[in-house]
Amino acid sequence: MSNEPISKEELTKERTPSELWDWLIQKVKQICSTDEGRKDFRLQKGLLKQLVEEIAPLAIFGKHKFGDTDQVLLQPVIGNQNYDALVTDLRTKPASDTYIEITQAHEGEDDYWRRCELLEKGIVFSNAPVIKTGKGKNRTVSIPPEATPVEERVKNELDRIFVAAQKKEHITYPANTSLVIFFDDTPPFQEVIDNEKLDSFINTKILNLDLRFSSLYLVGRIGITFREYQINRQD
């Protein structure tokens, strides 16, 4: 019997948006109910990486985009294909399939070290510098308890969104594929960047990139920000 806290079969099960959201909440609660599970979740071990980086964004996207309908099915896909989820819309005759590619607007390796710090100390400054010294087994990492100016925090998040989009440039995806960029919209982001400012940033910075998708969605980590943009495919 596997000791994995989650299986590929339950991770990739086809669900309605409401079912996926409810399952995600219950699954995370179940996993984090033990010290070992909470550690695995924070370090995103095994399939928990997909749970955090693909299933959570998909669930938040589905909740905003489709609401409580039972006529849309979301199915996460794990593998080497160039999309992360299949969306089957039963509201059309015949039913139609579209695809979702999900990417993270985060700080790469430093995100991992912040999670390690959180696990060890129970608290971490989310925007303080990650200071690394040494290499290999001699590497040490420290994150000082320093506050970051609001303007810098917001600029950093916008920069991460831009970099996430840039990484998808010039890549051809199946027709009817949408890009979801999952980002951190925790305060003070929303207090500084309202929808009008966010739309202006996307229109001037992101939509000028060679993004070969049908639509772009910005999905906030705390489930509040949700913006949709049409893209003129350039392939």
Image: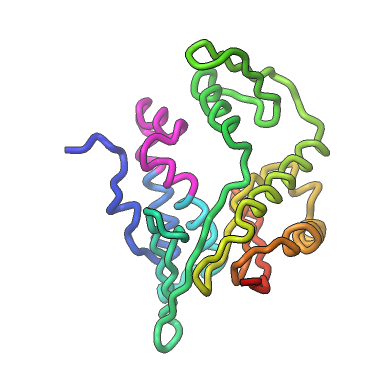
- Which residue is painted at 54% across and 25% down in the image? 118
Q: Nearer the viewer, residue 81 or 140?
A: 81
- Which residue is painted at 61% across and 25% down in the image? 124
Q: Is residue 179 above or below residue 55?
A: below
The range drawn in magenta is 28-53
Q: Is residue 227 above or below residue 55?
A: below
**Relative image position of residue 72 (x, y in whole percent):** 43, 73
Residue 101 belongs to the span the image colors magenta: no
The image quadrant of residue 106 is top right
- Which residue is painted at 68% across and 44% down in the image? 160
The image quadrant of residue 95 is bottom left
The image quadrant of residue 187 is top right
**Relative image position of residue 79 (x, y in whole percent):** 37, 54
User: Which quadrant is home to the N terminus?
Assistant: top left
**Relative image position of residue 131 (x, y in whole percent):** 66, 19
Number of marks: 0
Residue 51 belongs to the span the image colors magenta: yes
Answer with left or right where residue 214 lies relative to residue 54: right
The colour style of the image is rainbow
**Relative image position of residue 189 (x, y in whole percent):** 74, 45
Q: Nearer the viewer, residue 206 or 15?
A: 206
Question: Looking at the image, which residue sits at the far top?
Answer: 138
- Which residue is painted at 64% across and 63% down in the image? 211
User: Which quadrant is home to the C terminus?
Assistant: bottom right
Main SS of the magenta part reads helix
Q: Nearer the viewer, residue 18 or 184?
A: 184
Question: Looking at the image, which residue sits at the far left?
Answer: 1
Answer with left or right where residue 102 lies relative to residue 126: left
